[in-house]
Image (cartoon, rainbow, N blue to C red):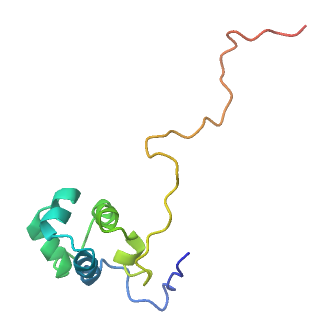
Amino acid sequence: MPKRKSLTNASPIAFRGNRLRSLRHLRQISADKVAHQTDLTTHHIYRLERNERPNVWGTTIAKLALVLGTSTDYLLGLTDDPTPPPRSRQSRSAKPAPTEEPTSDEGVESVP
């Protein structure tokens, strides 16, 4: 697991547009393709790369991280390792198992 930077010694948490641009070039992905896959405009992608958007929504950062194959921590400057953490095998649509027993007594035989 990549080592996180200490928040006391790190610069403020902020979106790092230079990392977006570097990864996009490294992975040879056009700004148009990133824009299309993240439901943003190409102009917005370029503005993010130039740090012209000071407040970036978390969902936007998450979408960018998925498209670029990195972590949100990397895009926010919390780690210098662009390698994403391993994803769980559980499907996104899978619901967690219930934590309580069913309350219905239907079909349950009582013991005298």
> Farthest residue in the bottom direction?
9
Horizontally, residue 13 falls left or right of residue 40, namely right
Residue at image x 52%, y 51%? 89
Residue at image x 44%, y 46%? 92
Horizontally, residue 97 falls left or right of residue 69, namely right
Point out residue 100 in the picture as x, y percentages from the top left corner.
66, 32
| The quarter of the displayed image where residue 77 is located | bottom left
| The quarter of the displayed image where residue 39 is located | bottom left
Nearest to the observer: residue 91 or residue 97 = 91
| The quarter of the displayed image where residue 49 is located | bottom left
Quarter that holds the N terminus = bottom right
Nearest to the observer: residue 50 or residue 25 = 25
Total numbered circles: 0
**Vertical placement of 78 versus 30: above or below?**
below
Point out residue 79 in the picture as x, y percentages from the top left corner.
44, 81
Point out residue 61 in the picture as x, y percentages from the top left corner.
31, 66
> Farthest residue in the front direction?
28
**Vertical placement of 73 versus 11: above or below?**
above
Quarter that holds the C terminus = top right
**Vertical placement of 48 versus 101: above or below?**
below
Residue at image x 52%, y 78%? 2
Residue at image x 27%, y 62%? 60
Horizontally, residue 67 falls left or right of residue 4, namely left
> Farthest residue in the left direction?
43
Point out residue 111 in the picture as x, y percentages from the top left corner.
87, 10
